[in-house]
C-alpha cells in the first residue's frame, strides 16, 4: 500500500482592481505593445490599500474549502507559500488559521519566492506521507505590488497580486503512476544566483525593500532549469512528456512558458496559461492557474499534471500529480 496526497478542492481570489498595460503609459516610458510582446501580460489585479496577504489567502482558502465540501476544523495543517507576509512574524499562515476560525492543527509559511507553491506542495506531501497530517490546506498568496519600484519599467509592469489554494488529503493507493494524487516532486536551489533577483530590504536594512531583477539572466536560467526539473520529476514518477495532460507552469512570462513547453515536447494546447490576465503573482500563480484551469473545464479528474516554477534564490522545482 502507498500513501498519496490527493487534491480534494481548489479555489482562488483576485483583488477587484484590474490594471491594464495602457495605464502604465501615463507614468512610464513603456507601451502595451512592449509589455504584451515581451511578456504576454495584458492586465494584472492589484490589492487595495487595506488588503493584506492574509486576507487574499483567506478568501482563496474559503473557496477551496467550499470546493472540497470541508469545514476549516477538518484541516490538520496550513502551509502558506509567500514572500510578502504582512508582518515579519507571526506567519501569514497563522493569521489565515485565525481568520478561518480554526482552533486546532498547525500553520506555517514557506518562502521560496516564485517557486514557493512547489516547495509548499512538496512539504505538504511529505507531512501526509509521514503521518503528521491527514488534510493539508496549501496556499500561495502574494501582494508583490508592495515590493515594486514603480519607476522601474523593467520590473513593475510584470507583477500582480492574488491567491490560490488547494486541499490535499491522505488516501491509500496502489502505488502505480495511475494513482490519483502527488506522484513525485523535485526541488532545487542554487544560492550563488542571489544577485539576479532579490528584494533590497529586510532586517539588514530596516525597510521592506524593492524588487531588483536582471530580467535577461533570470530568463536564461528559467527555460533551462524548468524543463530539467519537470523531466526529473516525470522520471521519478516513471512517466514521460507523452503522458502529460497539462503543464501548469509558474506564470511569469509567456516566452518562458512556451520555451519550457517546447523543450518538454508538449504542445501549447496542453499548457494552462493565465499570465495574460494575472501577470506574475509569484507563489500564487500555480494555484491560481490550477483553479482557473479547472473552472475553464481544462483540468479534469484523472488528468496528469506537471507544475513547475523558478524564482529568487534561485529556487526551482516541479511536482507531478494526477488530479
Ligand atoms: N517598456 C519598454 N521598454 C522596456 C521595458 C518596458 N516595460 N522594460 C525594459 N525595457 C527596455 C530595456 O530598458 C531595454 O532597453 P535598452 O535596449 O535601451 O537597454 C530593452 O527594453 C530590452 O530590454 P531587455 O531586458 O533586453 O528585454 P527582454 O527581451 O529580456 O525582456 C523581460 C525583458 C520581460 C524582463 C524578460 O527578460 C523576462 O521576462 N525575464 C524573466 C524575468 C521574470 O520573469 N522574472 C520574474 C521572477 S522569476 C520568475 O518568475 C521566473
Image (cartoon, helix red, strand yellow):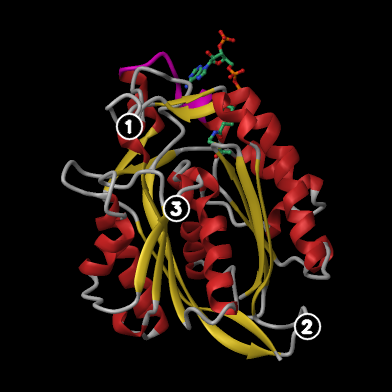
- The front one of 186 and 249 is 186
Q: Is residue 50 left or right of residue 295?
A: left
Image coordinates of residue 306 in percent, x first then y, are: 67, 61
Residue 132: where, in percent of width, then height?
Answer: 49, 78
**Ligand 1, image quadrant it occupies:** top right
Q: Quadrant of the N terminus?
A: bottom right
Residue 103 lies left or right of residue 218; in this view the side is left
Q: Confirm whether the magenta stretch covers residue 120.
A: no
Task: Choose top left, top right, bottom left or bottom right for residue 222.
Answer: top right
- Residue at (21% x, 67% y) in the render: 99
Mark 2 or mark 3, earlier in chain = 2
The residue lying at 46 percent from left, 48 percent from top is 111
Q: CA distance from mark 2 to mark 3?
A: 30 Å
Q: Nearer the viewer, mark 2 or mark 1?
A: 1
| Residue 83 tag number | none
Q: Around disc 1, counting alpha carbons within 10 Å, would you say few (fewer than 14), some (14 to 19), or many (20 or more)? A: few
Q: Which residues are magenta?
A: 27-35
Per the model, the C-alpha gap separating discs 2 and 1 is: 47 Å
Q: Is residue 72 above or below residue 24?
A: below
* Mark sitting earlier along the chain (2/1): 2
Residue 32: within the magenta? yes
Which quadrant would residue 31 be assigned to in this image? top left
The answer to which quarter of the image holds residue 258 is: top right
Q: Nearer the viewer, residue 24 or 208?
A: 208
Read off the residue under disc 1: 203
Above or below, 130 against 222 in this view is: below
| CB at disc 3 and ligand 1 closer than 8 Å | no
* Circle 2 SS class: loop
Circles 2 and 3, Cβ within 8 Å, touching? The answer is: no
Mark 3 lies on residue: 284
Quote the CA–CA distance across marks 1 and 3. Answer: 24 Å
Residue 176, numbered circle: 2
Amino acid at each position: 500500500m502507498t500513501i498519496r496526497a490527493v487534491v480534494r478542492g481548489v479555489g482562488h481570489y483576485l483583488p477587484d482592481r484590474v490594471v491594464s498595460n495602457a495605464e502604465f503609459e501615463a507614468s512610464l516610458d513603456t507601451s502595451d505593445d512592449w509589455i504584451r510582446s515581451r511578456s504576454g501580460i495584458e492586465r494584472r489585479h492589484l490589492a487595495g490599500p487595506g488588503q493584506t496577504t492574509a486576507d487574499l489567502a483567506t478568501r482563496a482558502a474559503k473557496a477551496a474549502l467550499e470546493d472540497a465540501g470541508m469545514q476549516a476544523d477538518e484541516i490538520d495543517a496550513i502551509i502558506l507559500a509567500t514572500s510578502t507576509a504582512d508582518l515579519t512574524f507571526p506567519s501569514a499562515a497563522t493569521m489565515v488559521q485565525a481568520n478561518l476560525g480554526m482552533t486546532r492543527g498547525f500553520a506555517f509559511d514557506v518562502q521560496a519566492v516564485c517557486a514557493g507553491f512547489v516547495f509548499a506542495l512538496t512539504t505538504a506531501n511529505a507531512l501526509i506521507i509521514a503521518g503528521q497530517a491527514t488534510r493539508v490546506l496549501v496556499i500561495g498568496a502574494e501582494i508583490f505590488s508592495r515590493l515594486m519600484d514603480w519607476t522601474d519599467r523593467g520590473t513593475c509592469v510584470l507583477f500582480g497580486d492574488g491567491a490560490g489554494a488547494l486541499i490535499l488529503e491522505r488516501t491509500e493507493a496502489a502505488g502505480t503512476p495511475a494513482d490519483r494524487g502527488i506522484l513525485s516532486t523535485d526541488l532545487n536551489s542554487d544560492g550563488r544566483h542571489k544577485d539576479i533577483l532579490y528584494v533590497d530590504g529586510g532586517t539588514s536594512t530596516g525597510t521592506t525593500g524593492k524588487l531588483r531583477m536582471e530580467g535577461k539572466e533570470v530568463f536564461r536560467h528559467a527555460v533551462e532549469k524548468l524543463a530539467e526539473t519537470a523531466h526529473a520529476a516525470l522520471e521519478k514518477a516513471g512517466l514521460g512528456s507523452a503522458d502529460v495532460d497539462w503543464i501548469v507552469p509558474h506564470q511569469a512570462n509567456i516566452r518562458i512558458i512556451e520555451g519550457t513547453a517546447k523543450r518538454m515536447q508538449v504542445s501549447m494546447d496542453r499548457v494552462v496559461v493565465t499570465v495574460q490576465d494575472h501577470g506574475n503573482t509569484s507563489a500564487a500563480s500555480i494555484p491560481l492557474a490550477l483553479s482557473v484551469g479547472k473552472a475553464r473545464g481544462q483540468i479534469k479528474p484523472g488528468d496528469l499534471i506537471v507544475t513547475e516554477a523558478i524564482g529568487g534564490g534561485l529556487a526551482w522545482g516541479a511536482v507531478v500529480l494526477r488530479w
